[in-house]
């Protein structure tokens, strides 16, 4: 029986690292998707908190169709806490969406590089 060439051993080691990398990114990406879905189910408020006369609480939402919506929350502590939590979830959602895009971009580039390399080899 002939001995396996060193280059083949090295390629097998690289392949094992690639498989671990894919699994790791798969776990990370799945977790990010799950966190995004959880935040969306809980409700998001892309808005800035605003106090009027240091008594009345409003959410000033981002501009949509040239209009800025002001949502009156009032003075009720429970409603204020709920509104602030939805603003915080929106911030987390934005960050996670950015992370998701970065992971997907990285994986897409990695796949593209692999495909180019594989296509450069021809079997006859």
Image: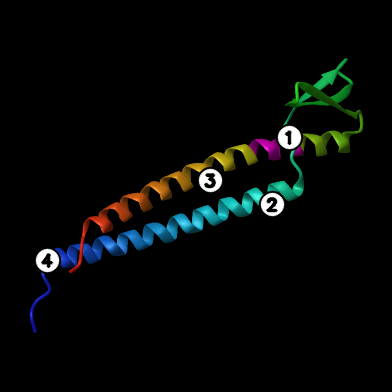
Mark 1 or 4: the one toward you: 4
Tell me the residue that label 2 is attached to: 38
How much space separates mark 3 and mark 4, taking CA atoms? 38 Å
Tell me what residue is drawn at x 58 percent, y 43 percent.
96
* Quarter of the image that includes the C terminus: bottom left
The residue where tag 3 is placed is 100
State whether residue 51 is above or below residue 32. Answer: above
Determine the residue positioned at 48% across, 48% down. 104
Q: Nearer the viewer, mark 3 or mark 2?
A: 3
In the image, farthest residue toward the bottom: 1
Mark nearer the N terminus (2 vs 1): 2
Residue 42 at x, y = what percent?
Answer: 76, 48
Element marked by disc 4? helix
How packed mark 2 is, by other alpha carbons closer than 10 Å (few <14, some 14-19, many 20 or more), is: few
- Horizontally, residue 57 falls left or right of residue 38, namely right
Magenta span: chief secondary structure: helix
State the CA–CA distance, disc 3 to disc 2.
15 Å
Q: Nearer the N terminus, badge 1 or badge 4?
A: 4
Residue 4 quadrant: bottom left
**Which residues lie in the magenta part?**
86-92
Q: Which sits earlier in the primary sequence, circle 3 or circle 1?
A: 1
Within-10-Å neighbours for mark 1: few <14, some 14–19, many 20+:
many
The residue singled out by tag 4 in the image is 6
Residue farthest along the front direction in this orientation: 124
Q: Which residue is mark 1?
A: 87
- Of the numbered discs 3 and 2, the one sitting upstream in the chain is 2
Tell me what residue is drawn at x 41 percent, y 46 percent: 106
């Amino acid at each position: 029986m002939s001995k396996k060439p060193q280059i083949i051993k090295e390629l097998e080691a690289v392949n094992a690292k690639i498989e671990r990398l894919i699994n790791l990114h798969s776990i990370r990406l799945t977790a990010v998707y799950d966190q995004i879905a959880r935040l969306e189910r809980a409700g998001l408020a892309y808005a800035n908190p605003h106090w009027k006369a240091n008594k009345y609480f409003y959410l000033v939402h981002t501009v949509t169709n040239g209009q800025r919506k002001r949502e009156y929350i009032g003075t009720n502590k429970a409603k204020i806490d709920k509104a602030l939590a939805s603003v915080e979830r929106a911030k987390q959602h934005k960050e996670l969406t950015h992370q998701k895009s970065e992971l997907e971009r990285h994986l897409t580039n990695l796949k593209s590089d692999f495909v180019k390399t594989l296509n450069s080899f021809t079997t006859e």
